[in-house]
Image (spheres, helix red, strand yellow):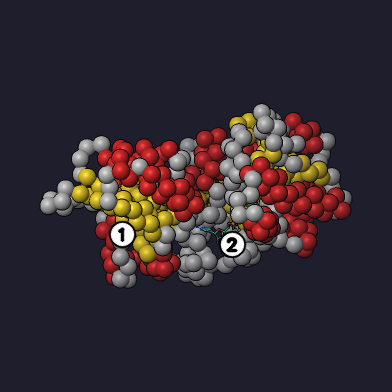
């Protein structure tokens, strides 16, 4: 008998019919003789709707109350799902995050899991019931308040439960057939990967592939959880996200052994959520970059790419540009403006019309010429590159936001990633 954790995303439980379909699927897995713990997301786009509602009431909702509001979404779906399963003659019990023992730090809206104490889930399993857990939510022991794990956080709930319970596999059910070489909504020729390393998946998720939440991938990597990302709309095998050398026997069977050689490129991803700040006319003397980024760091902003231009010999001044999430732009601009006199720069520019494309692949390590091919493909499409950064297994470029989808498609083709057919998206709005 196996212990399986199954996570169903919002698009898989969008309405009553879908909930019944998912319930049947869970019951089928149970009938096959498995123990099952389910993590479920809020129905459809209901988290977005609750968020919109909050902003209609006030432009800056109180974080504690916002978490109270948003966690209501998962409470609805968990209860409906448990009812549906019970009506099929199987025992099911729903649990909020705190009942399921998801203990987090106190950071509302982006809480981190610090402990998982799934005693009540174990009891339910021992009594033959299916345990249904509200995704995306936790509880802080000090403040005694309800927290949320960040958008897309139900993935993390599932992975954390799988780790704590020692599950054989963590299945992430969604509205596409697995992890593709690019977002199938944008690149219809994207093809499904049979397997991807957690290292590559981490880079793809960080670069905007929202099919898995980055913190869930990190957690799975740290705790050795193997993921199976698959569609809730069919029974096809999806994509295995494996941790090199540590694949569970269950996942190894799905994989038919460990990969012999990794492909050079796993996929491409794009991110439109960032903006670019340029500090113009910075004195080109030691210590200025340190001064600027100390100011930025104090705002807790997540700086991504940094580029410093060559200074003009005649002026001794240089420009420094960096990217960061748009949501953090205003506070960073304010902080820098307050220190303009001290640092001695001439001005600030803010550009929120950028897009970031990332090409990811473990095989890049040993392959030269990957960046040349990427730049060539963009050049041939007439797309200008504004910034470049690289890691061992990733190359990222910043372009204009309105060229990013075309950029994805031409790069996808240039690296021979185009599949034969057209990728299917089964549901969801992509919101
Ligand atoms: P869920 O509601 O199940 O959590 P999400 O909307 O969070 O689903 O994630 C699934 C979506 O992720 C897909 O519909 C797809 O548009 C998007 N996506 C982005 N990049 C990829 C990728 N590389 N492979 C598959 N899907 C991707
Ligand atoms: N419902 C939450 C969200 O929309 C969590 C999740 O779906 O993973 O972000
Ligand atoms: Mg998701």
Marker disc for residue 175: none
Camera-side residue: 144 or 127? 144
- The residue depicted at 39 percent of the width and 68 percent of the height is 403
* Ligand 1 - quadrant of the structure image: bottom right
* Residue 292 vertical position relative to residue 349 in the rendered view, above or below: above
Q: Residue under label 2, please give it.
A: 431
Q: Is residue 12 visible?
A: no
Cβ–Cβ below 8 Å for labels 1 and 2?
no
Q: Is residue 162 left or right of residue 330?
A: right
The quadrant in which the N terminus is found is top right
- The residue depicted at 77 percent of the width and 41 percent of the height is 95
- The residue depicted at 70 percent of the width and 53 percent of the height is 42
CB of mark 2 near ligand 1 (< 8 Å):
yes
Marker disc for residue 386: 1
- Sequence-first disc among 1 and 2: 1
Task: Name the spot of residue 19 as percent of width and height, x first.
Answer: 76, 58
* Residue 287 vertical position relative to residue 31 in the rendered view, above or below: above
**How busy is the neighbourhood of tag 2: few (under 14 within 10 Å), some, or many (20 plus)?**
few
Task: Name the spot of residue 200 as percent of width and height, x first.
Answer: 44, 47
Helix, strand or loop under label 1: loop
């Amino acid at each position: 008998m196996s212990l399986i954790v199954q996570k169903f995303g919002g698009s898989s439980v969008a309405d009553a019919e879908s909930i019944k379909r998912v319930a049947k699927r869970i019951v089928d897995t149970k009938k096959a003789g498995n123990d099952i713990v389910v993590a479920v997301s809020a129905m459809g786009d209901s988290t977005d709707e609750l968020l919109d509602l909050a902003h209609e009431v006030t432009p800056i909702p109180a974080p504690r109350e916002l978490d109270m509001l948003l966690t209501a979404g998962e409470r609805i779906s968990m209860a409906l799902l448990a009812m549906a399963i019970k009506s099929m003659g199987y025992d099911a019990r729903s649990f909020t995050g705190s009942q399921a023992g998801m203990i987090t730090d106190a950071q509302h809206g982006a809480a981190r899991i610090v402990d998982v104490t799934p005693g009540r889930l174990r009891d339910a399993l021992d009594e033959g019931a299916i345990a249904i857990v509200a995704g995306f939510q936790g509880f802080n022991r000090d403040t005694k308040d309800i927290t949320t794990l960040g958008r897309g956080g139900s993935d993390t709930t599932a992975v954390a439960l799988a780790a704590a319970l020692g599950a054989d596999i963590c299945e992430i059910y969604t509205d596409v057939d697995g992890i593709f070489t690019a977002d199938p909504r944008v690149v219809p020729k994207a093809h499904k990967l049979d397997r991807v390393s957690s290292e590559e998946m981490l880079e793809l998720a960080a670069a905007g592939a929202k099919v898995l939440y980055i913190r869930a991938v990190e957690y799975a990597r740290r705790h050795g959880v193997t993921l199976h990302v698959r569609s809730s709309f069919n029974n096809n095998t999806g994509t295995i996200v494996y941790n090199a050398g540590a694949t569970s026997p269950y996942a190894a069977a799905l994989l038919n052994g460990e990969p012999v050689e990794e492909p050079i490129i796993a996929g491409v991803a794009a991110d439109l959520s960032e903006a670019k700040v340029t500090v113009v006319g910075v004195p080109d003397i030691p210590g200025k970059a340190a001064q600027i980024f100390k100011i930025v760091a104090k705002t807790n902003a997540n700086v991504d790419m940094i580029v410093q231009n060559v200074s003009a010999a005649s002026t001794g001044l240089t420009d420094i540009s960096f990217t960061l999430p748009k949501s953090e732009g205003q506070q960073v601009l304010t902080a820098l403006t307050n220190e303009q006199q001290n640092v001695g720069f001439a001005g600030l520019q803010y550009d929120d019309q950028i897009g970031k494309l990332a090409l990811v692949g473990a095989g890049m390590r040993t392959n030269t010429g990957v960046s040349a091919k990427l730049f060539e493909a963009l050049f041939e499409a007439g797309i200008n590159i504004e910034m470049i950064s690289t890691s061992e297994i990733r190359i990222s470029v910043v372009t204009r936001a309105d060229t990013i989808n075309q950029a994805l498609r031409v790069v996808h083709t240039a690296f021979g990633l185009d599949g034969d057919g057209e990728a299917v998206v089964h549901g969801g709005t992509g919101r």
